[in-house]
């Protein structure tokens, strides 16, 4: 490998104290792991909440002793109240979308591997990087405090002292507006019902804090990628993971501020008596509300979804990048259509800014704009299809090695197709008449966001674990985890489409009130059984993850025979990644099975002419 | 492992397609004039979706089966792609998707881009946490004046009807929606407190009720009967039981009903609710 | 395939680029925040009949002048640094900071004037936006002042490495871009609040 011939831009001493090494670290690798650990914790809370929801839906009215002890107000006699259920819906969505899907793929794996894959020593702004994690962490703590503010009488009483809009202690596990928090329901305060007090304020504040953390991170990612690529690493030689992280960061940079703006307006409506979203002459809970006038509930929806749609692409693009990367590696073939893939990533990201209205077709907004949004929405299917074709093209003529990361990457392709294809149904205005706010929508977004995205993260974890921790995860446990989870998630979410066909509305605490839903019973039970099994099996993953960190077989530098820069350095990498040597890149990222080459892979740093 | 994965993907595909094709879980029967057009648009869409889904999954299953690594010494095919193929499949996909998109606007346009036809029967709908109020104009066909300041749930003035207005005398406000069969109906949708949504699956029609707005929608129901009405926008703790009924009545029964004053209207509609049965599910 | 020729950039340019890119990205992000709020302003002004624009507090003419001048002074400061006039750079930087503080002071005066007239954040939608815009802008300006304050400190306690010095130069360039943006943003908000419609 060529020796460095120019000065390195920035070198600092490796930190020595425990706090500087593992807590307030400036090292992008430590920060990446911190994000991953945050996501791993948050997802447990999210999954437990979903199981509680499934149990309530399947066996309504069941007494659960522990619920009675923990939540005497929200689940009196151990039976979940409707508002308790709705708080689970809200917190499950908020925790999963923000603290799992918007942390691990970008802040976790992106932080760890973007600098290394482009040949840099660290991110452009290491201090900012550390700040972005800790701000995100504080956001998570504030969100969890919403659970206690509502769920615990003592904590609730304390918050209630802060003022009218901070009334708390309703006994639920947090606010109950859904993760979408539409006003006026979310803007009126406790007069609109239980779970509308302090929990909502804390929820808004937590999301605002999260926005700031994300923005700091996005700024760092883009600057790093534009400014710190090593010699020979042109943009078109970057791994697709880097393109995905880049596009995701641009989406985050431009969409999170809009959510922040909306959140500030909502908070002001709640605590300062403004009327951005709340119209006048509202008669709530038996009395006319004198405080507000002239606001527009639709304005919130526009602001929220202008953010909300790019957000779902933020959740999935890194998974797409990882899938492309991992598929190519284990197929021993270059990615099919690298340029088309880059184009598709940009097209998805760019178009993603112009389709937010498809969440609002029947909201009361202009039916003309609905038509425009609809046609644009269906056109996003095109770059998504391009990516799918190219993944299949990568596998055609391949020599596939079925390692655990590869299985999850293949699973991603299957699940992305399954989830994405129903976008063609939901994106049409005429069909949305029926499907809006039904389980058909829930099926769609869970398959793409909740499952395909997670599979991308699993694939990334199994793939990069050896590099991060210097040890291999257990292949047998990994394969077991894959099989049960893959079949399990299909078993959970495909039936949701059928529920949607019946017309089953979302966010119902109980389905027993309606005759037209009576044929859903078998579906509901089937899903619950599948969910309990699938969630339980994740224990195997957690065990594998933490046990292998200490007891796994020692990993070599390049156990997968991959080509990109992270496999050039030791496992785990030294503090400054390349130990002072500036890597020089001579090849593209996916040079597998090159005719005439000695091995079936050529590292990006392998000098010209060497075989 | 490759063969196992291929088989698993194919089995999942077959099971998923069966779930739709079996017809066990399908839309309840359409009762509106525009309903069949939506159902046929859905059929076209789901067939396209189903074919795309099945081919992609079958293709995936096939490549993981056929191209699994075996002991043979041959390397994978070295290829960076095929530009012509990219262009072809991009264009084909674009044509199919965008055509679907444009086709999917037709029913929407017919309902939303045109006002209700003249002679439509108007009902004002006022939603609240957690019930529905339907305001009928009565024999004089003029709605009495309403004022939010006059709303008083405890005295049962749910929509703020102004008793001083002579037009209000024959108005009725009841929790059930009654509409005539085979005659266009216009609903004027409003909300007292938070956002709700009007949802009768058989109508193939959904619309949010937004506080501060009066949203007009129109449709024609063509099957007599009793149908459940549900709320389809999270509105608080009892969202799941914000329930009511829609009666689609033969012309003479309907005309007789809506000419009645409040108390008689209330009693008669209860009779009709017992008379008509929900569809068989 | 030949090795791609990537020209080596001098270290100072690399740092300058890095901070400059960061500044532009921050500007893009903050602009999106204000775009969201401005769109809300426009929508809200049309959504009901209670839109009564407040009278402009006269002191805002002072605010505007102060911030315009501060853009001039920070530009002088930046050019001094480029011309290697370290003393000039430091001096004009301090002037800019003082002007910036003056701007914030005048904003507080405007708030107090309005409060004395009984105009608060919830008085009417226009006043809500007034307080919101000025608070959001002021907060971001304060952030910029903190950055400038840091740069002022660095003029007296220079770093003793080439690396550190070059970072200082890069940071000064980036801070200037950000400051001009704060100025332009104020002008935009000022015009929107009091001269639009």
Image: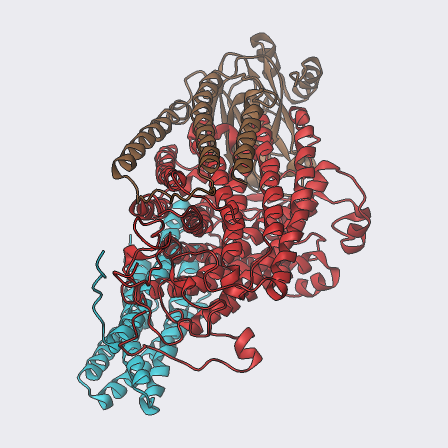
Chain colours: A red, B brown, C cyan
Q: Which quadrant, please, contains the C terminus of chain A?
A: bottom left
Residue furthest out toward the top: B252
Residue C42 coordinates in the image, percent (x, y): 35, 50
Front residue of this view, candidates A494 and C130: A494
Q: Which quadrant would residue A365 be assigned to in this image? A: top left
Front residue of this view, candidates C65 and A259: A259
Q: Which quadrant would residue A487 be assigned to in this image? A: top right
Residue C110 coordinates in the image, percent (x, y): 38, 71
Decide: is B130 above or below C165: above
Task: Give the residue at x 51% y 69%.
Answer: A30
Say whether residue A281 is left or right of residue A356.
Answer: right
Task: Give the residue at x 34% y 87%.
Answer: C154
Decide: is C86 above or below A570: below
Q: Which quadrant, please, contains the N terminus of chain A?
A: bottom left
Say whether residue A396 is left or right of residue B197.
Answer: left
Q: Can I make out residue A183 in this image?
A: no
């Amino acid at each position: 490998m060529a020796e460095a011939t120019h000065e390195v831009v920035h070198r600092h001493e490796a930190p020595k104290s425990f706090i500087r090494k593992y807590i307030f670290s400036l090292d992008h690798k430590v920060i990446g792991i911190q994000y991953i650990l945050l996501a791993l914790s948050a997802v447990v809370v999210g999954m437990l909440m979903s199981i509680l929801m499934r149990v309530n839906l399947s066996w309504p009215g069941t007494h659960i002793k522990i619920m009675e002890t923990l939540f005497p107000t929200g689940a009196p006699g151990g039976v979940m109240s409707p508002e308790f259920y709705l708080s689970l819906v809200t917190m499950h969505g908020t925790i999963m979308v923000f603290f799992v899907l918007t942390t691990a793929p970008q802040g976790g794996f992106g932080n760890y591997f973007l600098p290394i894959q482009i040949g840099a020593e660290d991110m452009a702004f290491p201090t900012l990087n550390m700040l972005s994690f800790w701000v995100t962490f504080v956001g998570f703590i504030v969100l969890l405090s919403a659970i206690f503010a509502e769920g615990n009488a003592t904590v609730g009483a304390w918050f209630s002292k802060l003022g009218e809009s901070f009334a708390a202690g309703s006994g639920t596990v947090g606010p109950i507006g859904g993760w979408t928090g539409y006003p006026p329901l979310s803007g009126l305060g406790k007069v609109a019902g239980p779970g509308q007090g302090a929990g909502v304020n804390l929820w808004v504040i937590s999301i605002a804090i999260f926005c700031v953390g994300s923005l700091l991170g996005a700024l760092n990612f883009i600057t790093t990628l534009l400014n710190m690529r090593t010699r020979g690493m042109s943009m078109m030689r970057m791994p697709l993971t880097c393109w995905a992280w880049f596009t995701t960061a641009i989406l985050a940079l431009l969409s999170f501020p809009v959510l922040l703006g909306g959140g500030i307006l909502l908070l002001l409506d709640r605590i300062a008596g403004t009327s951005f979203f709340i119209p006048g002459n509202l008669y709530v809970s038996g009395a006319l509300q004198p405080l507000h006038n002239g606001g527009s509930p639709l304005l919130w929806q526009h602001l929220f979804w202008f953010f909300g749609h790019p957000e779902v692409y933020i959740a999935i693009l890194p998974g797409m990048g990882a899938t492309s990367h991992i598929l190519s590696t284990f197929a021993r073939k270059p990615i099919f259509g690298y340029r088309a893939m880059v184009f598709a990533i940009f097209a998805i990201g760019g178009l993603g800014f112009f389709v937010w209205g498809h969440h609002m077709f029947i909201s009361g907004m202009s039916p003309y704009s609905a038509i425009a949004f609809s046609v644009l929405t269906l056109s996003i299917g095109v770059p998504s299809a391009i990516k799918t074709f190219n993944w299949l093209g990568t596998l055609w003529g391949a020599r596939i090695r079925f390692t655990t990361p590869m299985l999850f990457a293949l699973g991603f392709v299957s699940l992305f197709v399954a989830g994405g294809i129903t976008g063609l149904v939901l994106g049409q205005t005429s069909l949305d008449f029926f499907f809006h706010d039904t389980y058909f929508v829930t099926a769609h977004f869970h398959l793409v966001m909740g499952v395909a995205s997670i599979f991308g993260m699993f694939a990334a974890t199994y793939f990069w674990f050896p590099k991060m921790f210097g040890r291999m995860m257990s292949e047998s446990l990994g394969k077991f985890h894959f099989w049960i989870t893959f079949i399990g998630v299909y078993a959970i979410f495909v039936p949701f489409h059928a529920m949607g066909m019946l017309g089953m509305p979302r966010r119902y605490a109980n389905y027993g009130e309606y005759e037209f839903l009576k044929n859903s019973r078998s579906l509901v039970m089937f899903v619950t059984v599948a969910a309990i099994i699938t969630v339980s099996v994740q224990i195997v993953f957690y065990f594998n993850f933490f046990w292998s960190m200490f007891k796994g077989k020692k990993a070599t530098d390049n156990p997968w025979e991959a080509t990109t820069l992270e496999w050039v350095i030791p496992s785990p990498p030294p503090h400054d990644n390349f130990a002072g040597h500036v890597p020089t890149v001579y090849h593209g990222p996916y040079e597998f099975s090159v005719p005439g080459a000695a091995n079936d892979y050529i590292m990006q740093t392998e000098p010209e002419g060497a075989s | 492992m490759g063969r196992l994965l291929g088989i698993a993907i194919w089995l999942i595909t077959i099971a998923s397609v069966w779930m739709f094709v079996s017809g066990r879980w399908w839309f309840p029967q359409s009762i509106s004039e525009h309903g069949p057009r939506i159902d046929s648009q859905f059929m076209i869409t789901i067939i396209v979706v189903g074919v795309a889904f099945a081919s992609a999954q079958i293709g995936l299953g096939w490549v993981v089966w056929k191209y699994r690594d075996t002991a043979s010494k041959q390397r994978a095919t070295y290829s960076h792609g095929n530009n012509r193929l990219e262009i072809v499949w991009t264009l084909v996909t674009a044509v199919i998707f965008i055509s679907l998109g444009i086709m999917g606007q037709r029913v929407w346009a017919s309902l939303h881009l045109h006002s209700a036809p003249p002679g439509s029967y108007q009902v004002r709908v006022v939603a609240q946490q957690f019930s529905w109020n339907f305001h009928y104009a009565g024999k004089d066909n003029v709605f009495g004046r309403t004022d939010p300041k006059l709303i008083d749930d405890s005295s049962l003035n749910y929509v703020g009807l102004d008793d001083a207005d002579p037009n209000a005398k024959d108005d009725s406000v009841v929790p059930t929606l009654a509409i005539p069969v085979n005659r266009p109906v216009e609903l004027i949708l409003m909300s007292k407190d938070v956002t709700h949504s009007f949802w009768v699956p058989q109508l193939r029609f959904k619309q949010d009720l937004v506080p501060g707005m009066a949203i007009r929608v129109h449709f024609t129901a063509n099957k007599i009967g009793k149908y459940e009405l549900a709320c389809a926008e999270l509105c608080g703790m009892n969202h799941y039981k914000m329930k009511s009924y829609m009666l689609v009545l033969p012309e003479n029964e309907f005309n007789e009903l809506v000419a009645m004053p409040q108390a008689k209207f209330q009693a008669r509609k209860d009779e009709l609710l017992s008379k008509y049965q929900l569809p068989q599910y | 395939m030949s090795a791609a020729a990537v020209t080596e950039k001098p270290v100072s340019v690399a740092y300058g680029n890095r901070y400059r890119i960061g500044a532009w990205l921050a500007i893009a992000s903050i602009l999106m925040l204000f775009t969201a709020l401005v769109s809300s302003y426009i929508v809200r002004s049309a959504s009901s009949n209670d839109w009564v624009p407040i009278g402009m507090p006269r002191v805002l003419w002072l605010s505007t002048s102060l911030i315009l001048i501060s853009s001039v002074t920070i530009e002088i400061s930046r050019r001094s640094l480029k011309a290697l006039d370290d003393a000039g750079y430091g001096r004009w930087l301090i002037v800019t900071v003082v002007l910036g503080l003056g701007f914030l002071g005048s904003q507080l005066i405007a708030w107090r004037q309005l409060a004395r007239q009984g105009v608060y954040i919830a008085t009417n939608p226009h006043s809500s936006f007034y307080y919101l815009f000025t608070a959001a802008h002021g907060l971001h300006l304060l952030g910029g002042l903190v950055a400038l304050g840091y740069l002022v400190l660095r003029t007296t306690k220079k770093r003793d490495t080439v690396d550190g010095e070059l970072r200082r130069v890069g940071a000064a360039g980036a801070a200037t871009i950000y400051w001009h943006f704060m100025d332009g943003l104020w002008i935009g908000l000022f015009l929107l609040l009091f001269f639009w419609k």
